[in-house]
Structures are given as C-alpha cells and as structure tokens.
Amino acid sequence: MSQPRTITEKIWDDHVVTHEPGSPAVLYVDLHLVHEVTSPQAFQGLRDRGIKVRRPDHTMATLDHSIPTTDTRLQIIPDEIARKQVDQLRINCKEFGVPLADLGSIDQGIVHVIGPELGLTQPGLTVVCGDSHTSTHGAFGAIAFGVGTTEVEHVLATQCLLQNKPKTHEVRFEGPAPKGVGAKDLILALIAQIGVGGGTRHVFEYTGEAIRALSMEGRMTVCNMSIEAGAKAGLIAPDEKTYEYLKGRPRAPRGADWDAAIERWKQLVTDPGATYDRTTIVDVTKLEPMVTYGTNPGQGVGITQAVPDPANIADASQSAGVKKALEYMDLEPGKPILGHPIDVVFIGSCTNSRMGDLREAAAVFKGRKVAPGVRAMIVPGSEKIKKQAEEEGLPEIFRAAGAEWRQAGCSMCIAMNGDQLSPGQYSVSTSNRNFEGRQGKGGRTFLASPATAAASAIKGAVADPREFLV
C-alpha cells in the first residue's frame, strides 16, 4: 500500500522529470502565463541564443500591468516606458508564436483573472508566471507560483524549472464566517496571525468549513495572498464548485475528455493519514472585517480594534517594525482605525476584481453617494468581467454613487500605469500589498475587502461594512 500523501505531494510527484540527490528537482510546467513587465528580457535571451519557445501551446500572454485604465488607451499609452513594454510583448508573441490577449480582445485582462476565466487553470497542474501572485491559481487545486525573469526564460526554452520540494502547511479555517467576514478578511486574519514570514518554504493547503463555503472567486482571493505570508504557493483541493466553474470554459476539456478529467481531479485530495509539516488553525467564528494599519500585509487588525502600540509588543524587531510603519502611515498608537479619514478608494487588482467582488461593492454603493472629496475607482479584472458587469448594470450603480468605472487592468495596485496616489494620500484598497509607495510615492494604504472599501468611500473614512449590510 502506498504511503498517504498530501495534495501538494501528489502534484509535485507527478511533475518531477528527474531529481538527483542533493540537487533541486527538474519540475515540468503545465501552464506558463506571461505579461509585459517581466518577459522582455526573457524573450531577448531566447532571441540571442537562437532558441524557440518550447511549448507555445502551453503559454499565454496578456497585457495588464503597464496599461492605462482610461478609455483612450486603444489610441495612445502616454507613458513611454509602458508603451515600449506593450509594443515589445506584441513583437515577442508574434515572433515566437505565443498567444496574446491584446488590448481590444475580449480575452484581455489581469493575468491571474484570465487564466481561470479561459479554463487554462485546472486542477493538478503546475502553473508559473513572472508575477508573485501566481498563487491565485492554487484555488483550483494546482501548484502555482511566481518566478523571476531568468526563470521565465528557462520555462519558455525548456518548459521546466529547477525547484526544491516545498514543505506542506495546512491552514485550517475552523467554523462558519460571521456576517460581514469574507475571503479577504480570512486571508488578512491569517497573515496577521502568523506574520509575513509564517509560510516561508511551504505550500499552504487551505481547509475547513469557511474555505469550502467560499465561491471559486473567494478561494482565488485567499490563494492570491499566500505569498504575503511568505508561502511558496497556496492551494485548495478541487470539489464540485471547481468543476462547475470550469465546465464549458474555452480551454477546459470537453466530452469524454471532461469525464476523464473529473475522475483525475477527484483524486486530488489529501489522503487520510497524510501528515503536514505544519498546521495553523484560524478560529473564523471570532473574526470581524479586517483592515491593515501598517506597511506590510501582516500588520492588520479587526475593523473595531485600535492601532497597536509598539511599546506593548515584546519582540524588539516586531516592535521596531510597527513603530516605523506607524511613522510612515502617520497613525497614533492606541487610536481607533475606524473613522480615519481617507482620500481614495480602489476596488480592483488580481485579488478583488472579479464579478463577486464588484457585486459586493455595488450592494454597498447602491442608493448611496461617495463622500465629498473622496475619489473611488472601480477597475474590473478583465474584459469579460467588464462586459458582464455592464450587462448587469453595475457601472450605473457605481457612477450614480460618484465612483469611476474604468477599463480592465492592474491599475492602482502597482502604480505604474498612471493610476496612483499622491504623496500623503490615504487609500482603502482591495489590492494585496500596502508597502511604502506601492500605490504611489508617499501614498498610504489600508488593505481591506470590497465591502469595507465601498463602505469607506461612502463614509469618507475607514468604515465597518456591516453597517451597510442588509
């Protein structure tokens, strides 16, 4: 009888091409996603060596990071560097035969949104991209992780990577989620509990009642921010929700191939008796909507809690980190974070730009107005989502409230596309990182859920979304 294995170990074992003792394994890559920022040097490396892309049929490119989210972007991209990146990806994809979701295509969108949308992301796969939030795809029961530009070149050339086997880490969310607590709150609570290094060298497997209750979109949100806890990747075993999401998508199996795929996917569970290297338990019943106060995603608290006092933190390094963060954020220890004035609300990014996120925000905005002096930006994650939201009338709700409805892209998450904070501005953002300057030089970011972000736009200050929930 074979030894019980975790889902991570099963997928890993299925993809090891060869492994010499004392060396990294050669790991096969099923799906390689590409965007305009981390790929130019990789393609140039192939060109310089006269090498072709080994599996263009297992590669997919899109434009997302550098592109503006304005209505005029099909005519002009004002930033010269961004324009060159976009043009170069077009040249590279044409030359090397890589499919590209270009501007104007219904398939265009944020790389971690369109992979699942197209049915490219499937259970049991290995997925890589030159982007740290590739862990998003783990929501489908895949091992998915970000790679550097040099590794992007390696995958383009060989469809393989040198990798050390990660350790396994079960993250069990016990109990049902209280009212107002969603996927973003779950993952922010975990990172606050274990810190930004709590998952280092591990793959998270998310389990528990609260995870199973999430939609696929919610699961993608949770897996998306695995990297913010230092994990290599994060995944969730596939189930009926996974199969329902994928069925009929353009690149999903069909007919007899679909039936065979389902049988394979049903084996992608952690066996009874399998052991994890670590287990973390989060008591979901005690959670409330979360918000960050500092400059890393682990510096988060419940929405009704006070800003921590560094003097009360025993660990000297952690205390110094909180002190530095509060100086940057210009927040007083011991003061409530609820009610802190804000300037901008951003709802979007690969973390929270899907239909469920937009509906969640629209439910709060409906019949209400954005507070005077606050700018609210709603940015869909893909052209398909934009189209569906428009069919459902969501942009009318946003515009009536005084919010902006923009084109699909990464937008203010990365602040390299014209969408950014001004120095000193405060933002409530549904993105994944609150680093210094992440959303614009001198900008200050509170990370939160779409409902919290929308509620804050209406209040003009950090707000508790439960006040607006029916």
Image (cartoon, rainbow, N blue to C red):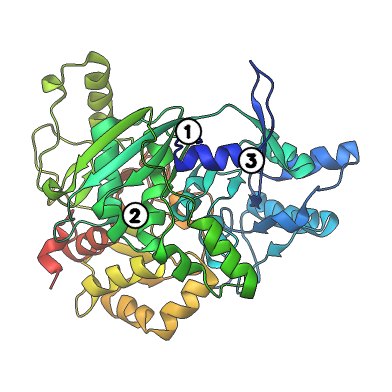
> In the image, what residue occupies the spot 39% across and 35% down?
274
Vertical arrangement, residue 257 with respect to residue 456, above or below:
below
Residue 3 marker: 1
Closest to the observer, 32 or 343: 32
Q: Is residue 158 left or right of residue 370?
A: right
Query: Is the residue 102 above or below the residue 124 in the image?
Result: below
Q: Earlier in the sequence, mark 3 or mark 1?
A: 1
Q: Position of residue 116 (x, y in %)?
A: 53, 62
Q: Secondary structure at mark 2?
A: loop
- Mark 2: few/some/many CA within 10 Å (<14, 14-19, 20+): many
Give the Cα distance between marks 2 and 1: 42 Å
**Label drawn at residue 430:** 2
Which quadrant, please, contains the C terminus?
A: bottom left
Q: Looking at the image, which residue sits at the far right?
A: 50
Q: Quadrant of residue 91?
A: bottom right
Q: Could you say whether the residue bearing mark 1 is in a helix, strand or loop?
A: loop
For the residues labelled 2 and 3, the Cα–Cα distance comes to 34 Å
| Quarter of the rendering containing residue 40 | top right
The amino acid at mark 2 is Thr
Residue 122 shows up from this direction = no
Identify the mark at residue 15; answer none if there is no mark: 3
